[in-house]
Image (spheres, rainbow, N blue to C red):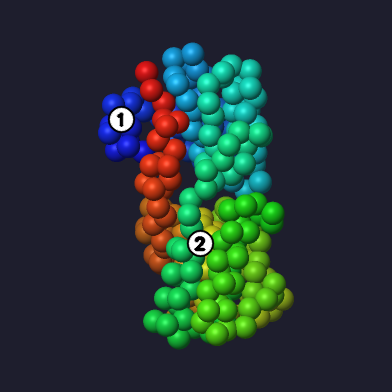
Amino acid sequence: MRGQCAKYDYDLLVFSPMVKVCHTDKVYLNGELNIFNLINYDLVDGVLVASLELVEDQVYTVLEKLEADLRMKCRKPVVSLDLPLADYPTSFTDDRKAIRSVVKHLVNEHGCRKLYILTGQKDYIVSEGRAEAFCEQMRAEGLDVSEDNVFYGNFWYTGGEEFADRILSGEVEMPEAVVCANDFMAVGLANRLISGGVKVPGQVRVTGYDATKEAVFNTVSITTYNPDVYGMGLMESICCIRS
């Protein structure tokens, strides 16, 4: 995004708290969120909202407040990224190719045959798109796949932990690999499986998506995919904030 803004001589203003919206210290979190009150919408030409990053573990409070502020104060174009926001246009990262590449790698390089996908909330466009890509590549590899291979989480650590509990209890049959639709769920899944006595990646391979530092620096580092957010920035360059 910065590179594309520089190309067109745009100024890019980034407003972001330093902590996640699920931060346990609510007093500190509320202080961090005051950064959004600093936005003067009269001085910008457009707004990009990283909506998916503002929702964690089913907590929509921050995104809902930002939406209310936009409706009340902003008369400029608004584009949401990767998650629908009210009736504003939404741009999605092209991640189908990425998910298919991960599945292909697990099957061809590691010999995995029993794979699951742990995606985000049901009926989210991002969640369903990644699940569909998973199923498409499984079929392309000649493997059986059905709704029994697709599981829904919440794009947060707890989604991975809850899925791990289902595997550890025997409710869900042990897979050879789990393709997670983001890194947070992958970290939660891997850590909970390990605490339950399962070897990762020895018994179960766990992959993530987003290439976050949490995946890299986890006790057991997570193989992850770096999405083409640069490409998404190119597509939406017309909506970059400009002074």
Given the image, on which type of amino acid does mark 2 rest? Arg
Image vertical order of residue 83 relative to residue 213, above or below: above
The residue positioned 43% from the left and 45% from the top of the image is 232
The residue positioned 53% from the left and 79% from the top of the image is 140
Looking at the image, residue 200 sits to the left or right of residue 124; the answer is left
Q: Secondary structure at mark 2?
A: helix
Asked whether disc 1 touches disc 2, contact meaning CB atoms under 8 Å apart, the reply is no
Looking at the image, residue 46 sits to the left or right of residue 128; the answer is left
Per the model, the C-alpha gap separating discs 1 and 2 is 29 Å
Q: Which is more N-terminal, label 2 or label 1?
A: 1
The residue positioned 36% from the left and 38% from the top of the image is 1
Image vertical order of residue 60 relative to residue 42, above or below: below
Q: Position of residue 49 (x, y in %)?
A: 52, 34
Q: Position of residue 48 (x, y in %)?
A: 49, 33
Q: Pick the quarter of the image with the C terminus.
A: top left
Residue 89 occupies quadrant: top right
The front one of 211 and 126 is 126
